[in-house]
Amino acid sequence: MGYLEGVAPRWIAGGLLVLLLVAAEVAARLGRRRTPPASPELRRLIDTVQAAVLALLGLLLAFTFSMAAERYETRRVLVLREANAIGTAWLRAGGLPDPTAGEERARLRAYVDVRLAFYAAGEDQERLDAALWSAEDLQAALWSTAMEEARRAPQAIPLGLLLASLNEVIDLHEERVTAMQAHVPGEILIMLMFVALIGIGSVGYSYGLAGHRHHAASAVLGLLVAGIVHVILGLDEPRAGLIAVSQQSMMDLRDTLDRLDRR
C-alpha cells in the first residue's frame, strides 16, 4: 500500500475517523465566525462545491472498492486453482513406477502443508521466507524426480501429463506470491482520504454558516467513510485485513489426500 504499508487497517480507519470529525468541527466553527454573514449567492456556491466534492468522494470510494475487490477475488480464485492443480498432480503421480510414485505423492502432500503455512504466516517475514523456501525446495525435488523418470521413459504419456501438472503447480505458486504483493496504490488511498476530509469539511462549514450544529450527521458521515475505507483495506490486505482469503479448498485437499493415503 505504499505510504501506508505496515500499518494495520483498523489504525488507518480509526485515524481517518478522528481526522474527519476534527475537520467537520473546525470547519463548522470557521463558518459560524464568518463576518459578514454569507449571502444567499455565496451559500448556493458553497452548496454546489460541496455537492461536487461529495460526488467525487463517492466515485473515488466506488473505484477504490472495485480495485480492492478485484484483487481479493483474484487471490480467492488462485487458491482454488492451486488446490485443483496439486490434486491433479497427486493423481497423475500415481502413474509413476513404485517407489517413485509414493515419493512424489508424499512430496505433494507436504507441499499442501507448506502452502497453508505460507498463508498462516501472516506478516511474520521469517515464517513467510521459511514457507517460500520450503515450497521452492519441494518444487525442485518434484520436478527433478519427474524429469529423471522422463529420461528413462521419454515416450510415457503419464509422465508427460505429470510434468504438465507440476509446471502448473509451480506457475500458480508464483501467481499467488505476486497476487499477495499486489495492492491498491497508496497514492489513490491518500487522495481518497484527502477528498474525504475536504468533503466533510465542506459539510461542517455549511452547518456553521447556517448557525446549526449537527454533530450526529457529521459523526454518521465520518463513520460511513471510515468504515468503507476499513473494508477496502481489509479486502486489499490478504493477511492482516478484516476479510481473509479463504483457504478452505486447500484444507479440503489436505483432508482428501490424508484420507486417500490411509486406504
Image (cartoon, rainbow, N blue to C red):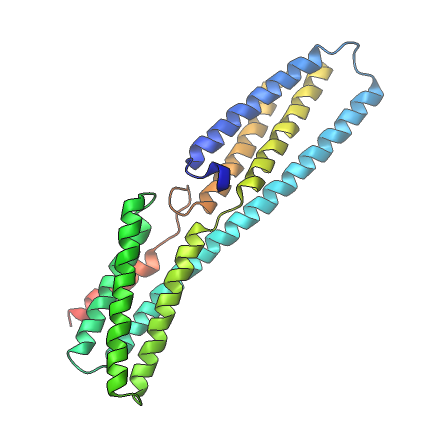
Q: In the rendering, at what x and y percent does residue 172 appear?
A: 39, 64
Image height check: is 184 above or below 202? below
Q: Residue at x 54, y 45 (%)?
A: 185
Q: In the rendering, at what x and y percent does residue 60 appear?
A: 62, 41
In the rendered structure, the answer to whether residue 111 lies left or right of residue 180 reads left
Q: In the rendering, at what x and y percent does residue 187 appear?
A: 57, 40
Image height check: is 74 above or below 92? above
Image height check: is 108 above or below 198? below
* Number of dots carrying numbers: 0
Residue 106 in sight? yes
Image height check: is 230 above or below 212? below
Q: Nearer the viewer, residue 208 or 53?
A: 53
| Residue ranking furthest to the bottom | 155
Q: Residue at x 62, y 16 (%)?
A: 26
Q: Quadrant of residue 189?
A: top right
Q: Residue at x 60, y 37 (%)?
A: 191
Q: Nearer the viewer, residue 125 or 72?
A: 125
Which quarter of the figure is the C terminus placed in? bottom left
Q: Quadrant of residue 83?
A: bottom left
Q: Nearer the viewer, residue 60 or 155?
A: 155
Q: Quadrant of residue 78?
A: bottom left
In the rendered structure, the answer to whether residue 64 lies left or right of residue 89 reads right
Residue 116 in sight? no
In the rendered structure, the answer to whether residue 71 lies left or right of residue 197 reads left
In the rendered structure, the answer to whether residue 242 lies left or right of residue 254 reads right
